[in-house]
Amino acid sequence: MTEVLIIRHGETEWNVEGRYQGQADPPLNDRGIQQAYELAEALYDHTLEVIYSSPLKRAYQTAEILAKKLNIEVRIEPRLAEIHQGDWQTHLRTEIQSLYPDLFHQWETDPWHTTPPGGEHLSQVQSRVNTALDDISCRHPLGSVGLVTHRIPIALIKMRIQNLPPDIVRSIQLPNTYFESLTISCPEAKH
């Protein structure tokens, strides 16, 4: 079994504003940097071999702060990036509601049958996140690793490991620098 410490990145100005980030790349704000340092203190006694991070700045900055305190390596894992929200990225939630009222309502109520214009479908995100999770668990079959990622990938990981219902992808509340320890087996080890 691999212990996987799932971690959401620290706060950005876009989080505060209610602006859709997706794969747009705003950095941590001052509070987000402070949150990452506080999380590093909280995890100081946690034995992690390595941290895998989304390549997006907000996640990578969080991972770097943690890795420095824990004296471990950060490895970029592109499959842990947030969902690509297409034309919605960089826009305020209120702007999206105004520009795409029907589609936005559908996204809020039935996300598994809705795709942001020019964006990624949830099943695509689920596939890449699950493949990353399988690869990482097989690389560290008895280890303990950190994953610094985003709200949607974390919801999908929790959905898989904890057998949560698919509707949690829109309803789950995960504050910045949320973390939780889960365990997963390498799928190859089950054969």
Image (tube, helix red, strand yellow):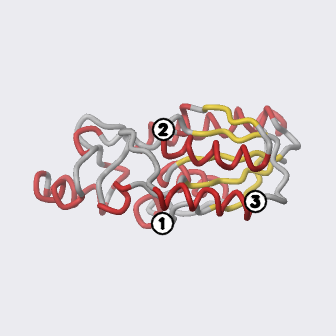
Q: Determine crowd level at label 2: few under 14, some 14-19, many 20+ residues with C-alpha closer than 10 A.
A: many
Identify the mark nearer the N-term, 2 or 1: 2
Amino acid type shown at disc 3: Leu
Residue at horizontal 50%, vertical 57%? 32
Amino acid type shown at disc 2: Leu
Identify the mark nearer the N-term, 3 or 1: 3
Q: Determine crowd level at label 3: few under 14, some 14-19, many 20+ residues with C-alpha closer than 10 A.
A: some
Q: Where is residue 152 shown, x and y percent of the image?
A: 47, 52
Figure label count? 3
In front: label 3 or label 1: 3
Residue labelled with disc 1: 172
Q: Secondary structure at mark 3?
A: loop
Q: Where is residue 154 shown, x and y percent of the image?
A: 56, 53
C-alpha distance separating marks 3 and 1: 23 Å
Q: Locate residue 191: give its quadrant.
A: top right
C-alpha distance separating marks 2 and 1: 21 Å
C-alpha distance separating marks 3 and 2: 22 Å
Q: Which mark is residue 43?
A: 3
Q: Where is residue 149 shown, x and y percent of the image?
A: 56, 47
Amino acid type shown at disc 1: Ile
The residue furthest left is 99
The residue furthest front is 30
Q: Determine crowd level at label 1: few under 14, some 14-19, many 20+ residues with C-alpha closer than 10 A.
A: few
In the image: residue 128, left or right of residue 68? left
Q: Which mark is residue 56?
A: 2
In the image: residue 34, left or right of residue 113? right
Q: Secondary structure at mark 1?
A: loop
Identify the mark nearer the N-term, 3 or 2: 3
In the image shown, does 84 or 69 lie closer to the viewer? 69
Residue at horizontal 69%, vertical 36%? 74
Q: Secondary structure at mark 2?
A: loop
